[in-house]
Amino acid sequence: MRTLLLFTSIVFCLFLAACDTGPRSSIGFSLPDGDAEQGRAVYTQLQCAACHEIDGVPQNAGTAEPAISVALGGTVHRIKTYGELVTSVINPSHRLASGYAEETIQADGKSLMRNYNSVMTVDELIDLVAFLQSKYNLQKFTPTKYRGYYPMG
């Protein structure tokens, strides 16, 4: 009973946090659908493959070996949302990639990823995000029985 009460309290708090209607809320924010093929062209044009790796997309073709290869796409247990991908492109320091040595992805707590905000159009952004999102495959979670309980995601 105590566990159920704790779980319910946590879910309620998360619900309240998601209901932020202040001036920094994302409520009402929506971009049109992008074109994944155009997004692939943007990915190539902006030379994203100099530091990022996506299965089926040549990395850094015709140039020197990349200093780092941050993987994008692949099979995941939780899909990257549209908002997460947009934020990763326009504010790469918001959340740094995990699993990499700090000095290879950041300096002074800021991402080493170049800021493309002044060189990329909104159309290019939405197409790039459509391309990136198409590279993620959601693997459904299959709970396993453990001592008569099923683990929570």
Image (cartoon, rainbow, N blue to C red):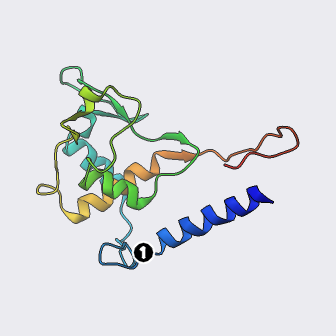
- Which residue is most to the left? 118
Q: Element at badge 1? A: loop
Question: Quadrant location of residue 23?
Answer: bottom left
Give 146 or 45, whichever is nearer the viewer. 146
Task: Rate crowding at label 1 as few (under 14), some (14 to 19) or many (20 or more) other CA atoms within 10 Å.
Answer: few
Give 57 or 14, whichever is nearer the viewer. 14
Residue at 12% from the left image edge and 55% from the top image edge = 119
- The N terminus - image quarter: bottom right
- Which residue is most to the top? 65
- Which residue is most to the front? 2
Question: Quadrant location of residue 135?
Answer: top left
Question: Quadrant location of residue 149?
Answer: top right
Q: Is residue 115 left or right of residue 32?
A: left
**Is 21 drawn above or below residue 73 in the view shown?**
below
Residue at 24% from the left image edge and 24% from the top image edge = 66
Q: Position of residue 32 (x, y in %)?
A: 36, 71
Q: Position of residue 75 (x, y in %)?
A: 55, 40
Q: Position of residue 54 (x, y in %)?
A: 39, 36
Q: Position of residue 27 (x, y in %)?
A: 40, 77
Q: Is residue 54 left or right of residue 117?
A: right
Q: Is residue 51 left or right of residue 149?
A: left
Q: Which residue is mark 1?
A: 20
**Is 125 drawn above or below residue 114 in the view shown?**
below
How many marks the image carries: the answer is 1
The kind of residue tagged 1 is Asp
**Is 26 drawn above or below residue 100 in the view shown?**
below
